[in-house]
Each structure stands twice: as structure tokens, then as C-alpha cells.
Amino acid sequence: MQLILGFFLAVTIAYLAYRARSLDRSGAFAALVVGTVIFGLGGWGWAILLLTFFITSSGLSRAFKDRKKEANEKYAKGGQRDAGQVFGNGGIPTLFVALHFFFPEAIWPWLGFAASLAAVNADTWATELGVLNPTAPHLITNLRKVVEKGTSGGVSWGGTLASLAGAGLIGVEAAVLNPFGVNWTFFVSVTVAGLLGSLFDSLLGATVQAIYYCPSCHKETERNPVHSCGTETTQIRGWAWLGNDWVNFSCGAFGVGVALSYFLLA
Ligand SMILES: [Zn+2]
């Protein structure tokens, strides 16, 4: 019964997001799968964390559009999210809801679920709000080096604070909506996991993520095979297979690793 309800809720949200151009067609289909599984196997508490990520990230990518225009060209994808992006961010949370279904008495699936969402939420908030930082970011692997706004691997105080806030919001929800009762230690572990996951994302962006170059705009970009201007891009660094979606996936996985280690060691 809950699966059917979850399906209808997910259809409604995916359709609205598609109409609002937050998701393209493949993204809407992927969101339908993720939403149905998370609501259907988890229920409201789990769905609220997913919706928090989904609504705030779509909202933030719309907000301040003009001020962000230039930096956005660097990112692999525009405001409209596709299936790769939805699974890159929502794949791990979906896996943990399934694990909760098989291990209903265990607490770690909730922790893994919340930590992965905290990490991708932190990363999205940092990306969307970090470009509003008044000064240019610094490279995470060499903090003395100033880089252009929107450069993969660039970090700023504004972006890091945004990341902390994005992780903290999911952290509060993880504590309050915990299926086994309110538990504030989850606020700490999930928030820290989210923040570190998003810094790991920046570290990958500065080192091994596939980065391309647009010969017409003379700019670095995550976009491939063509830049937003329509010109074909060429890879200048990183591992070819490690595109933006896998980096997001790794960001969530790193957050899970942090939260579960904290849980095991504390
Ligand atoms: Zn270009």
C-alpha cells in the first residue's frame, strides 16, 4: 500500500519538477524510481530528507540566476538535472532505504541514508551559494592559489559555510526524524559527514575529476562533449571516466564512510 502511495507521490513530484524544468525527461524518470523506493520502503521520515535535498537544490539552482550565469558555464550540466545526476545524488540513499527494508531493526541504514544526503546537499549548497562569495575561491589542494569562480576544486569561506548549513539542515532532520526516536548524536555525525563529503568532492575536482577545455571561450569546464557555447571540448586533466555524476556519487559515499566510522568508533 505504501509503495503505491509512494509511486503516486513520486509521479506528482517528478511531473512538477519536469514542468518546472528542474529535471529533464530522463531525470524525471530517475526521480520517479528514487522517490517511489524511498517513500515506499521508508515512509515519511525518509521522504522528508529526500525532499529537503530535492527542493532546496532545485530552488537554489534557480535563485540568483543572473549572478551565477558565468560560473554555471563551467559546471557539467545546467539547471535541468538528468538521470545521471539524479542517480549520482540519489543512488546511495536509495540503496540504504533498501537495506533498511531488509534490516528493519538496524539503525545504521538510517545513518548511511542521512549521511549520503547530507553530503550531496552540502555539496549542492556550496556549489550554488559559493559562487556568491564576494572574493574568488582558492584551490583546495593549494590554498594560496586563487582560481576563477566555478572552478572545480575551488573553495571559499562562503561556500564552506553554505556547505555546513546544507549538511546541518539534513543533520537536524536526521536527529529529529530518526525512526528509533530523537537522537542528537546523529545531528553531529551527519553534519560532520556532510561537510567532509563535500570537501572530498572539491578535492576530487582539484585532482582526478575529468576536466575539459573550451577552445572558443578559453575556459575550463566540466562540460563534455560540448561546451555551453556549442564548441567541442577537449580533456585537459583528470580521469576520463570520472565525470561529475561519479564525483557526486563519491561525495555521498565519503559522507557514509565518515558517519558509519563515527558510529562504529564512538
Ligand atoms: Zn565555449
Image: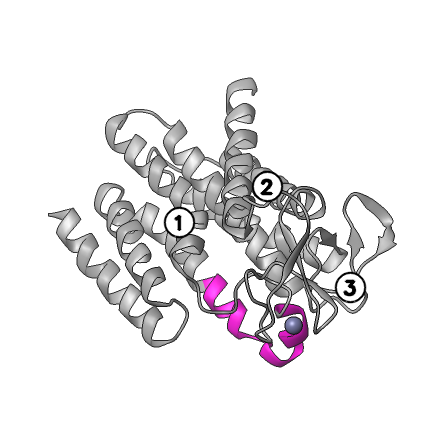
Q: CA distance from mark 2 to mark 1?
A: 17 Å
**For the view shown, which residue lies furthest in the bottom direction?**
66
The numbered disc on residue 193 is none
Q: Nearer the viewer, residue 153 or 95?
A: 153
Q: Residue 149, how many percent across, how many down?
A: 74, 65
Q: Which residue is mark 1?
A: 87
Q: Which residue is mark 2?
A: 197
**For the view shown, which residue lies furthest in the right direction?**
144
Label 3 beta carbon less than 8 Å to ligand 1:
no
Left or right of 90? Residue 33 is: left
Q: Residue 181, how many percent across, how many down?
A: 36, 35
**Crowd tier of the residue under label 2, counting other residues whose Cα lies within 10 Å: few below 14, some 14–19, many 20 or above:** many
Q: Earlier in the sequence, mark 1 or mark 3?
A: 1
Q: Which residue is mark 3?
A: 148
Q: Nearer the viewer, mark 3 or mark 2?
A: 3
Q: Residue 48, how many percent across, how many down?
A: 36, 53
- In the image, residue 68 sits, relative to residue 201, either above or below, namely below
Name the amino acid type tagged 2. Answer: Gly
Q: Nearer the viewer, residue 112 or 30?
A: 30
